[in-house]
Amino acid sequence: MATKKTVLLTAMDRVKIARDPKRPHIYDFINFVCSDFEELHGDRLVNDDRGLVAGFGTIDAFKCLVLGHHKGATIEENMEANFGMAQPDGYRKAMRLAALAEKFHLPVVTFVDTPGAYPGDTAEARGQAEAIAKSLEFFSLLKTPVVVVITGEGGSGGALAIAVGDRILMMENAVYSVISPEGCAGILWRDGAKAPEAAEALKITAADLKRLGAIDEIIPEPAGGAQKNAKAAAAAVKKAVVKALAELVKEPIDKLVDGRYAKFRAMGNFYK
Amino acid sequence: MVPRHWERTTMGWFEKKEAVKIPPTKALWQVCPRCKSYIPVAEWKANNAICPSCNYHGRLGARARIAQLADADSFQEVFREVSYSDHLDFHDATGAYKGKVEAVIAKSGEKESVVMGTATMGKIPVMLGVMDFAFMGGSLGTGTGERIARACEQAIAEKRPLIICCASGGARMHEGILSLMQMAKTSAAIGRLKAAGLPYISVLTDPTTGGVSASFAMLGDINITEPKALIGFAGRRVIENTIHQKLPPDFQSAEYLKAHGFIDKIVERKDLKPFIVKMLNYFGF
């Protein structure tokens, strides 16, 4: 039945669902997925970015580092967190704590939900490009298992910066794209209102991404979407994350890191 | 004397024969985008697209830059078979991606936005990649990412330092999510190269923005750039719309990036090669 419904949704419908403010956010997932959690703050350089939260927690039998974009549930939180658009400081906090997780052989679980990295003057001054670049390199070499869950908006480089991992899971109604449909329409259609066409052309839904090999697994959502039943949605996420962790912690670490490289290395190689 | 245009039109039939054909100005003169001086094209080219009166560093095509950086006759192109991919069968308001990119290929003779090859620089064997902004805005497509990843792997196998001259507007959206994934792929490959004890020198030329600045361009062991080059993550207008403020003119310039600690040195084009060779010498090559 769920499948029948799925077919009827356009890419732009999914974009709207993925952006629904009622959709579960990082703290909802932490509450439902972790039996305990302790948030830690700051990049030890300049700031504690609220657009990206991180801390240690327990998921089922696994102690791990949990981190993810934070959009905020109230307008005050939205403002404080820049609507989930992380500053370079957020990515540097993620790397700092991931290095700590690596040191104590704890896996990392990331939750991706951002319109994109923060496009502001402060972000540029503190090196948004460098922070994202470094994060991509850093997570590709990290000697501990990394599970990525794309829960809402996977907005370009700002999403990818915490989405380099051994398993890439994606919720059924989440989207993940190189550029927002509005941004793409503005450039290639010269009309932001053509976003639905751009969304279709860009192939940004979970099913499309699975077919393209950019993600590993689709996590089904409750009927009507995760925003209708956060608890059930989080339960499905937990199940998928625990399964992935159970498989990954068994792997010898060098094999795991080589496998992660091979996974991204194969993406977009059409000339074998 | 060249007849005035009204003379030519009003004098009609008998002036026609004598009318001197004026070659289009562009073929003879390069107008400096900054100081607006007229520079003979031959001089502009001989000077590697640098304005002799104001030192403006113009954009340089991949082949011209390779000629400037590689030792004479040392450049051997690799991975030329790796090109774009239209796996999304992408169409927008102005037509098909395939048609557009094929037109660029036919015009430029290049098959991707980065030209990669082995070369020597100051007799040191290196892997050299140069992006060309004229190829789809230097955008990072699957072919671009594939060429860079292969270059890293070959550099590791042959113990060559890697030098990439970047010039790009960012990821190539016509190739969708897999273009985004090239940011991860190239960064991972660069990470492996650096872990193998080899140096990577990134030359961020005008302009280096978006997904390229946020991946391999910013990952150099040494990051260098040319005077006044534009380097940044988000576009100026996007930022102005976000913060509701006008940005200063030098925002995202090479000088701004250096002042904020992201660039090791601003090097004039004429000094690029000696600087890179000097660094490689320090690193034991």
Image (spheres, coloured by chain):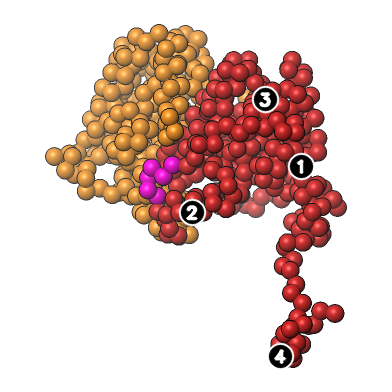
Q: Residues within 10 Å of mark 3 (few under 14, many from 20)?
A: many
Number of dots carrying numbers? 4
Residue A240 lies, with reference to residue B12, above or below; the image says: above
Query: What amino acid is at disc 2?
Result: Lys
Which residue does the numbered mark 1 point to in the structure image?
B227
Which residue does the numbered mark 2 point to in the structure image?
B100
Query: What amino acid is at disc 4?
Result: Gly
Callout 3: residue from which chain?
B
Looking at the image, is mark 1 or mark 4 earlier in the sequence? 4
Q: Secondary structure at mark 4?
A: loop
Q: Residues within 10 Å of mark 2 (few under 14, many from 20)?
A: few
Colour red maps to chain: B
Residue stretch in magenta: B85-90
Tell me the residue at 72%/85% (across/down).
B16
Which residue does the numbered mark 4 point to in the structure image?
B12
Residue B56 coordinates in the image, percent (x, y): 78, 49
- Residue B2 relative to residue A255: left or right: right
Same chain? Circles 2 and 3: yes
Which residue does the numbered mark 3 point to in the structure image?
B126
Closer to the eye: label 2 or 1: 2
Find the distance from the CA under tag 2 to the CA under tag 1.
Answer: 32 Å
Find the distance from the CA under tag 4 to the CA under tag 2.
Answer: 42 Å
Q: Residues within 10 Å of mark 4 (few under 14, many from 20)?
A: few
